[in-house]
Amino acid sequence: MIFAAYEATVKGTGKYSYPYLDTVLSSWYNKGFRTPEEAAAEPLPQKKRRGKKKPVVQEEQSQAQEWDWQILEKELNS
């Protein structure tokens, strides 16, 4: 479930965001979802945007996802 929430976070925001990930997991918990398959059927929570951001280039996004994954692992292991 954690990895599914991480993927949903990156898909929904374009980057790793712990508060967004927490929102996703809380939402799934409150709705009674217990498997990634149940959660996959649910639309992602909408993140409020404060302004326009430039789109992330695919190569930059790939590098950002790897770096974000390392942060997630560090936070989960601490």
Image (cartoon, grey):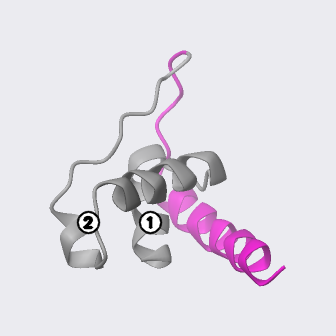
Q: Which residues are magenta?
A: 51-78
Where in the figure is residue 10, as x and y percent of width and height?
A: 47, 57
Badge 1 is on which residue?
5
Q: Is residue 60 above or below residue 49?
A: below
Quadrant of the image containing the N terminus: bottom left
Asked if residue 4 lies in the magenta stretch, the reply is no
- Say whether residue 10 is visible: no
Foreground of the two, 64 or 36: 36
Q: Residue at x 50, y 48 (%)?
A: 23
Q: Picture quarter containing residue 5? A: bottom left
Locate residue 26, reporting x and y percent: 47, 54
Rendered position, 46 above or below 35? above
- From the top left corner, tell me how far across and down residue 39 is, in percent: 26, 65
Residue for point 53% across, 26% down? 53
Q: Which residue is mark 2?
A: 39
Image height check: is 70 above or below 56?
A: below
**CB of mark 1 within 8 Å of CB of mark 2?**
yes
The percent coordinates of residue 33 (x first, y second) are 28, 68
Whether the magenta-drawn stretch holds residue 58 is answered as yes
Could you say which is closer to the camera, residue 16 or residue 36?
A: 36
- Could you tell which of marks 1 and 2 lies nearer the N-terminus? 1
